[in-house]
Image (spheres, rainbow, N blue to C red):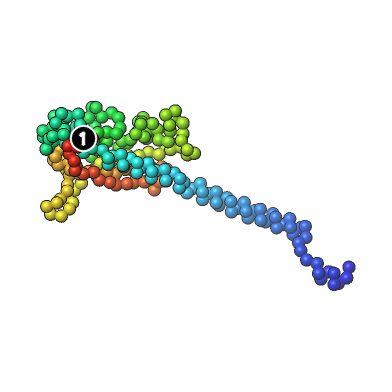
Amino acid sequence: MSTRDLGRQHGLTIIELVLFIVITGVAAAGIMRVLNIGSTSSTDPARRKQAMLIAESYMEEVQLARFTFCDPSDDNASTVADAAHCSQPEIIGPEADDVLRPFDNVNDYVSAINTAQRSFAIGGVDTDINGRPLGQDASATTLGNSSMSGITTTMTLNYVPALGPAGRVISSDASSNDAMRALRITIRTTYGTGPNDFIELDGYRTRYAPNYLP
């Protein structure tokens, strides 16, 4: 072989190619391991989205509930001007006939003020408006590709302190049933074990139609 032919030769030898494959494989394995650790330790975005939808749905249910002076079963419920004329006034906590959701008044969803409660759970499992575990159909079959087991929701009701301009103050307290004019609703849906693995929503319900019984 001439000197000219040797000068034109280029490329990788078989040994260099094998070494390249080995080094690339080791590097790729290390990168995949780092990515796997990151994915297992990070919050599943789908899980968080599920929790957001659940919290919003529960908030809507509570805000759509009545807020009347009397229990709707009271004969005077559609005519009284204050709770004093109710034979069964609405108070914080469900009445004996409130055993299934949706409850007939917003104040029936909890049994005490400023106390987080599993208001939407049956047997320790959060349920939909039909009493079924979330994410299951009537046959207890999981809907979609992701189970909602382990997701828990609490609800807290609080009286609203005096807010608004002079002459138009809205407030709520425990001094009387008539003074329960507005309530703050806090829904917290927890979807993981991390300190920030929850969705929390705040909403309000005012007593704007104390005799409305749809």
> Residue 183: horizontal and vertical position, in percent?
22, 43
In the rendered view, does 29 fall on the left or right side of 73?
Answer: right
Quadrant for the C terminus in the image: top left
Q: Residue at x 57, y 50 (%)?
A: 33
The N terminus lies in which quarter of the figure?
bottom right
Q: Return the residue nearer the eye: 181 or 21.
A: 181
**Circle 1 residue:** 213
Of residues 129 and 127, the one drawn nearer to the viewer in this rendering: 129
User: Which residue lies at the image location 35% right of the left edge and 39% below the top edge?
Assistant: 153
Left/right of residue 14 with respect to residue 155 in the rendered view: right
Residue at the extreme right of the image, as rendered: 1
Percent of width and height locating residue 8: 81, 69
Please name the amino acid that badge 1 sits on.
Leu
**Residue at 43% in and 38% down:** 148
From where the camera sits, is residue 36 visible? yes
Categorize mark 1 by other alpha carbons within 10 Å: few (<14), some (14-19), many (20+): some
Quarter-of-image position of residue 4: bottom right
Q: Nearer the viewer, residue 144 or 146?
A: 144
Residue 138 in the image: state x and y as whole percent: 42, 29
